[in-house]
Image (tube, grey):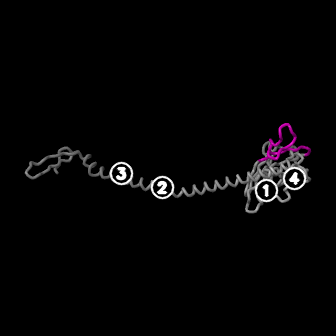
Amino acid sequence: MEKTKDPKKLAFILYEDHSAPSYFEISKNLFRFLFIGLPFVAFLAILITVGGALYFKQIKRMVEKEEPKIITELKTQRLELLQKQKQLENDQKRLEEKLATGTAGTSGADNLASLALFKHSPNRQDLSQAPEVSLDEFSTKVSNDKLLVEFKITNLTEEQKKVAGFLFVVMHEGSRVSVWPANSFVDQEMSVVFNKGELFATTRFRPVLASFDKPKENELLFKVLIFNRLGDLIFKKLISDTI
């Protein structure tokens, strides 16, 4: 290799047996690319290929690991749906039995005088003497033009069996009575149907927030009533409060 007059080029002389020497010139930039850049690009391509292969292999492992979890979740959802279906079938059967027996001789009917505001349903029973839920953390507060009533319904059943039904809060203010939910009254009737209440279901506890127009009186009386899906009264509590 000899020096060329052009500083940007490299000169080469190639000697072969029985042949005249051959003279070559090559750009320094091309020389660097062929002997430095090209190997680096090849190494980088290999590195990216290996990295990509490892990345997709990791994704495959994650998918394989998540698959049993998804299957477990689907089985759990299927079991819950089967339990709900069984519960609905049992409720339907009990409702048919209540409708078939009529209202005469209804068990606990004498204890339901406090429900005169509520529309009667066939063969309704008062099961509130052994309630499946309790009422805790009752409180009231005024916010703007509303009175907010907060409390928590706690499940008392063994093994936390799901309790479901309809919930009402009745507020007595002097001679005035207000019912929550506000749309509980049947159209063109001065009565409330049990399944117009706040629908709830809980295995542990369920927070409740009821809203009333701000009362004019400070001394208030609240009645919390809960019916099951068949119209039986399963919980009742009278609470006095001052705002």
- The amino acid pointed to by label 3 is Ala
Instruction: Determine whether the residue tagged by mark 4 lies in a helix, strand or loop.
Output: strand
Q: Residue furthest bottom?
A: 158
Q: Which mark is residue 137?
A: 1
The residue where tag 2 is placed is 60
**Relative side of 107 to 58, left or right:** right
Q: What secondary structure is the magenta-colored segment mainly? A: loop
Residue at 80% x, 58% y: name it. 134
Q: Residue 175 carries which label?
A: none
Instruction: Determine whether the residue tagged by mark 1 lies in a helix, strand or loop.
Output: strand
Magenta-colored stretch includes residue 183: yes
Instruction: Determine whether the residue tagged by mark 2 lies in a helix, strand or loop.
Output: helix
Q: Which of marks 3 and 2 is in front?
A: 2
The residue where tag 3 is placed is 45
Could you tell me how far apart the alpha carbons at marks 3 and 1 are, in whole angstroms? 66 Å
Would you call the spot at circle 2 few (<14 residues within 10 Å), some (14-19), or many (20 or more)? few
